[in-house]
Image: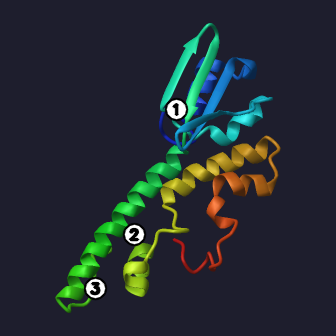
Amino acid sequence: MSQFSGKCDLYDCAVEIGGYDIKNIRLYLRKGERFYPLKLEEPRDLIPYYPYVPFLSHYSDGIYSAYISESFIDQEEKKLLECDLECLLREYRRAKRKKEPFNPDTRWYNNVIINRVKRDGEKATIKGIHRPISNHWREKLAKEMEANGYKEIEIVRWVYPDKLFEDFDWHKDTY
């Protein structure tokens, strides 16, 4: 499995099948209902897409084509954090309805989300929260991008896009 997501992702597919021969790799990004071909001029152009798991790919006549939509790391993290938030909101509503204190079991839920639900109630979000394992995969991608000459702003844009425009203090609301 890949060193960038723990799954059989684009890194595995591009290296194993495409062999980094960039002229034999076609990559399409899904936005809404449309697919857009990505311009790949050199092998380093693939690096930001390494943690993307192709939902459709094929190899024909020496050409590897892959269709991607979102980084596996982002998809999985969002799904798990939203699940935690929904469960905690359910507990919050129940406690509020029964006029009991909201004290969820911290062994099962993300502490940052618990604190947000305590503070914001129904308006709590997962915005800006990252899981430690997701940060592990993101750090690997950031190091690979840095080793291949990407600028810091490009790395942040790909690895932590939500850090670019957040208006809250990152140190108070992270792990």
Indicate the secondary structure of the residue bearing disc 2.
loop
* 25 relative to 126 in the view: left or right: right
Q: Which of the two marks, 3 or 1, is nearer to us in this view?
A: 1
Percent across and percent down for residue 10 are: 58, 32
Residue 33, relative to residue 108: is it above or below?
above
Which residue occupies the extreme bottom position in the image?
Answer: 99
Q: Are marks 3 and 1 in contact (CB under 8 Å)?
A: no
Percent across and percent down for residue 173 are: 54, 77
- Look at mark 2 in the image and give the residue it sits on: 110
Q: Which of the two marks, 2 or 3, is nearer to us in this view?
A: 3
Residue 119 figure quarter: bottom left
Q: Is residue 108 visible?
A: no
Q: Residue 103 or 52: which is nearer the viewer? A: 52
* 78 relative to 24 in the view: left or right: left
- Residue 31 shows which numbered tag? none
Q: Is residue 40 visible?
A: yes
Indicate the secondary structure of the residue bearing disc 3.
loop
- Look at mark 1 in the image and give the residue it sits on: 54
Q: Earlier in the sequence, mark 3 or mark 1?
A: 1
Q: Say few, some or many: other residues with alpha carbon within 10 Å of mark 3 (under 14 / 14 to 19 / 20 or more).
A: some
Q: CA distance from mark 1 to mark 2?
A: 29 Å
Q: What amino acid type is highlighted by mark number 2?
A: Asn
Q: What amino acid type is highlighted by mark number 1?
A: Pro
Q: CA distance from mark 3 to mark 1?
A: 41 Å
Q: Earlier in the sequence, mark 2 or mark 3?
A: 3
- Look at mark 3 in the image and give the residue it sits on: 102
Q: What amino acid type is highlighted by mark number 3?
A: Phe
Residue ID at (25%, 90%):
101
Percent across and percent down for residue 153 are: 78, 57
Residue ID at (66%, 66%):
163
Percent across and percent down for residue 93 are: 25, 80
